[in-house]
Amino acid sequence: MRLLALAACVLLLGARDPILVPEISQHEVQVRQGFTGADLLLFGAILSPEGSRAAQDYDIVVVLEGPVQSIVLREKQKIAGMWINADSLEFRSAPSYFAVASSRPIEKIVDDKTAAIYELGLKWLQLSPIGVIDPKEQRRFSGGLVDLMRREGFYREDEGAVKISGQVLYSARMSLPSSVQIGTYTAETFAIRNGKVVASAITRVEVTKEGFERFVAVTAEERGLLYGLFAVLVSVGMGWIAGRLFALV
């Protein structure tokens, strides 16, 4: 009987964990000529297992991650008065885009261990280098890559960007830059209470190219020779037009 009672208590305690119901303002972003970026609204509700208001104090962290890619980071050094490429490191699967929005500063929500497990911030982003490298060098190059991607607008952190209303509804805005990479973007939302992740949920958005941009992208990927000939013809045509214009001056 005691075992049954204990099992029932465990089930009841587990049932207290909230349920996240996430949504996103648009599940598809089309990149066309003149595309200047996109603003995404990520929102949802925190509910009890019965579907009613959770009625507890929760923090929300939203992580939006783009397709991974291989990136080679080169370090420049000044030698004999000239800047040249020195050391380099290739990362196997670095996110092309990585943004974190939270209801409060991450260090006030979870400890470093939990933040590292769920990658709740740029400080805890796990980057995998190719080959064996000294941990100190890996941290230096990882920090350099994060700093570079941050300055270019591909990596972001926005503490306090998540707004929670009545411990039921939450919302956060995130921006995609104009040079965003096409592919599937994953938005994972975490509900956190007393330093522990008690619920998580995922939504996705597809970034696609349309019109002339799609033609160029598909041709470059599937018909490399045709794309190369097209690029040469465009270059020759532009050069001829420029020559004619200068001849008329």
Image: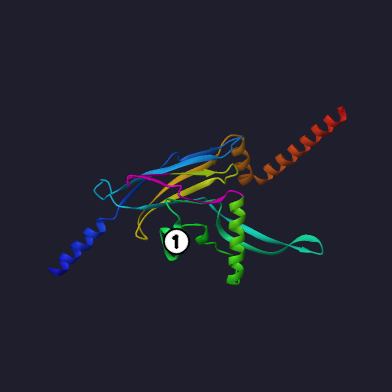
Q: Which residue is denoted by mark 1 in the rendering?
A: 115
Q: Position of residue 22 (x, y in %)?
A: 38, 46
Is 2 placed left or right of 73 in the picture? left
Q: Is residue 161 left or right of residue 87?
A: left
Identify whether 211 is placed above or below 74.
above
Is 223 in front, or is 173? 173
The residue at the point 77 percent across, 35 percent down is 238
The residue stretch that appears in magenta: 152-171
Name the residue at the top extreme: 248
Residue at figure coordinates x 27%, y 46% from the top left: 53
Q: Is residue 132 visible?
A: no
Q: Is residue 157 magenta?
A: yes
Type of amino acid at the residue the image marks with label 1: Ala
Residue 200 lies left or right of residue 122; in this view the side is left
Q: Is residue 119 left or right of residue 88?
A: left
Q: Position of residue 20 (x, y in %)?
A: 34, 49
In this picture, is 13 found above or below 210?
below
